[in-house]
Image: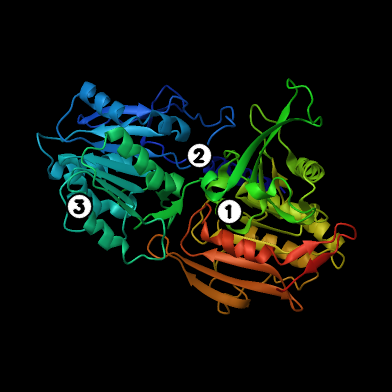
């Protein structure tokens, strides 16, 4: 028992570390100053930093409005000529960026040439600053000679690790990295300078985020150029890397290949209205001084009023340990699916922060009942849940402990730890006992998604699969659903899943350098009850294309609101 407790506590520590946001700078802890983090100094030619006036503080109070800190943008600006701090400040002011910085927790870094003109040393400085900034959402802006440097040096060498380029008045380069890069090309040379960017993205027609916009108005003001570039290109995407490691652990330039390109959260463009709800605990409309719960509602606008009774499915999202409560809406891929499929989505602060109370499993259930009572258009037979990491563990537990509520559940990067669990993390033993009691009487479909190179919640290997948290989760659902419990893995049968699956597929995606998903299903009779999705070589985080695989699995199931029996529709 002591070993199980120690293992659970170690897992708790790992999950706490996993909550740290990306975009942190490299630096050091200073002896005698505890765990205080001091960034390494910038090179001398980095002449200015401008940041959001509303900085995010990890572990601090949740600020409910706006986007989360996840994928906050960093802007590297290369001026036409060598500038001092005052000149750099004037350049940034001419771009009128502060609103974008404040709404997105952004940072601007102005980088003058190392010498009098841009040369090889400037790319070395770019690499230094890239490694130092650790940004998963790096945007590069160049003016004049700085734009020429971006076009001719940075775009061909680093385009696959940059989320967007703005080139203003620069000369054309010969090529752009074959992976392509989203770009906004402006100024008198725009049409010619854009051609290498256009050629690079032509080979990636399956990736709509790879977009090149040309603005040939040589008289356009810098502020107008930036505003249009943000609207059309920069604000549409982020790029980060989670391949062969986990993105918040950081990576050196070129270490893990091309970075994944993903859509940045933009609910308005999807025809979705987001509501921020701060609810006094147990008392709707009660005393604002009482402890409060927090959740975010995402409504396809046409469904907020006038949708038929019980016509709108419900997707519950649960963030990872100590993550911002917008994490899943903004990084899982379900926001984009909500825009396509038109269902209601709610992300809850289930774990609690310093200023919002934890919900726990009972609180999640209570909030769902409040939502069903408030919005008669919501369908009580089609309620689904998914989560990330600790949220995945919680969703996994909810599908068994609250099986009367959910028609299907799933999770990304989390299963069930052994023993009774620790802190907010449900353990295998109690879940197994409830699954055993319900065996033969209750069914809940389950979708398990994971990266095979996750070191925070590791996936099993041929030499180390016994007691693995993912296998624990699969077995718990096999037990409750009245299926054979496959507790012996044989990787000669399937090198990824260790057992024979039906509907086995390999899916090559357009993310990174072609990240691969492996998937298959376990059936009960003629009904698929468990879907497994492995993202090969992936670390501990969401992989957005898996949201489609999970939703396409979920939408076949509903639960009768009266009898609580599961209903499967193969169509």
Q: Where is residue 271 in the image (x, y as percent from the top left)?
A: 57, 48
Along the viewing direction, whichever of 121 and 284 lies nearer the viewer: 284
Mark 1 nearby-residue class (10 Å; few <14, some 14–19, many ≥20): many
Give the residue at the far left of this rendering.
Answer: 116
Judged from the image, the secondary structure of the residue bearing numbered disc 2 is loop
Q: Can the viewer see residue 421? A: yes
First in sequence, mark 3 or 1: give its number: 3
Residue under the image location 42 percent in, 61 percent down? 511
The CA distance from mark 3 to mark 1 is 35 Å
Residues at marks 3 and 2, CA–CA distance in whole angstroms: 39 Å
Looking at the image, can residue 459 be seen?
Answer: no
**Of the numbered discs in the image, which one, if any, rests on residue 184?**
none
Q: Where is residue 175 in the image (x, y as percent from the top left)?
A: 20, 58
Residue under the point 28% across and 39% down: 129
Q: In this view, does 477 lie to the left or right of 41?
A: right
- According to the picture, the residue beneath numbered tag 2 turns out to be 20
Q: Which of 173 and 193 is in front in this view?
A: 193
Checking the image for residue 339, the label placed there is 1
Ranked by sequence position, the earlier of labels 2 and 1 is 2
- The reply to whether callout 2 and callout 1 are in contact (CB within 8 Å) is no
Label 3 close to label 2 by CB (< 8 Å): no
Disc 2 versus disc 1: distance between alpha carbons?
28 Å
Q: Mark 3, mark 2: which one is toward the viewer?
A: 3
What's the mark number on residue 193?
Answer: 3
């Amino acid at each position: 028992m002591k070993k199980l407790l120690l293992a659970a506590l170690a897992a708790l520590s790992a999950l706490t570390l996993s909550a740290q946001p990306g975009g942190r700078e490299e630096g050091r802890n200073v002896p005698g100053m505890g765990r205080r983090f001091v960034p390494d100094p910038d090179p001398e030619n980095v002449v200015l930093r401008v940041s959001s006036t509303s900085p995010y503080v990890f572990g601090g109070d949740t600020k409910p409005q706006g986007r989360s800190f996840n994928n906050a943008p960093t802007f590297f600006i290369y001026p036409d000529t060598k500038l001092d701090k005052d000149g750099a400040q004037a350049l940034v002011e001419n771009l009128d960026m502060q609103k974008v910085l404040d709404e997105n927790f952004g940072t601007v870094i102005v980088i003058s040439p190392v010498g009098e003109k841009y040369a090889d040393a400037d790319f070395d400085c770019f690499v230094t600053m890239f490694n130092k900034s650790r940004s998963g959402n790096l945007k590069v802006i160049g003016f004049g000679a700085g734009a020429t440097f971006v076009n001719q040096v940075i775009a061909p060498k680093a385009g696959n690790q940059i989320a967007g380029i703005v080139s203003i008045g620069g000369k054309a380069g010969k090529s752009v990295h074959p992976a392509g890069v989203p770009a906004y090309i402006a100024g008198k040379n725009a049409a010619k300078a854009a051609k290498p960017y256009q050629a690079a993205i032509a080979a990636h027609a399956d990736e709509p985020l790879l977009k090149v916009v040309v603005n040939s108005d040589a008289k356009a003001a810098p502020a107008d150029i930036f505003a249009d570039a943000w609207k059309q290109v920069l604000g549409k995407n982020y790029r980060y890397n989670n391949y062969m490691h986990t993105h918040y652990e950081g990576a050196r330039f070129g270490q893990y290949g091309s970075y994944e390109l993903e859509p940045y959260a933009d609910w308005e463009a999807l025809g979705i209205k987001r509501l921020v709800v701060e609810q006094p605990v147990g008392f709707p409309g009660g005393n604002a001084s009482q402890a409060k719960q927090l959740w975010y509602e995402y409504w396809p606008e046409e469904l907020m009023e006038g949708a038929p009774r019980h016509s709108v499915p419900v997707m519950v999202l649960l963030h990872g340990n100590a993550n911002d409560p917008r994490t899943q809406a903004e990084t899982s891929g379900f926001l984009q699916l909500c825009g396509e499929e038109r269902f209601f989505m709610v992300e809850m602060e289930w774990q609690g922060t310093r200023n919002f109370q934890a919900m726990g499993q009972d609180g999640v259930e209570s909030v769902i009942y409040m939502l069903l009572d408030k919005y008669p258009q919501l369908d009580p037979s089609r309620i689904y849940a998914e989560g990330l990491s600790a949220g995945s563990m919680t969703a996994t537990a909810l599908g068994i402990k609250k099986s009367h509520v959910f028609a299907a559940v799933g999770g990304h990067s989390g299963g069930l730890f052994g023993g009774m669990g620790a802190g907010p993390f449900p353990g295998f033993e109690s879940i197994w006992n409830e699954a055993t009691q319900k065996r033969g009487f209750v069914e809940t479909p389950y979708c398990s998604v994971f990266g095979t190179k996750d070191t925070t919640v590791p996936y099993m290997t041929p030499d180390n699969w016994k007691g693995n948290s993912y296998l624990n989760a699969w077995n718990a659902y096999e037990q409750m659903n009245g299926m054979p419990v496959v507790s012996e893995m044989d990787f000669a049968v399937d090198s990824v899943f260790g057992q024979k699956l039906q509907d086995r597929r390999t899916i090559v995606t357009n993310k990174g350098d072609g990240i691969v998903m492996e998937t298959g299903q376990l059936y009960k009779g003629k009904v698929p009850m468990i879907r497994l999705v492995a993202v090969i070589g992936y670390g501990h985080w969401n992989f957005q294309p898996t949201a489609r695989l999970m939703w396409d699995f979920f939408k076949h199931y509903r639960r009768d609101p009266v009898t609580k029996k599961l209903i499967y529709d193969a169509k």
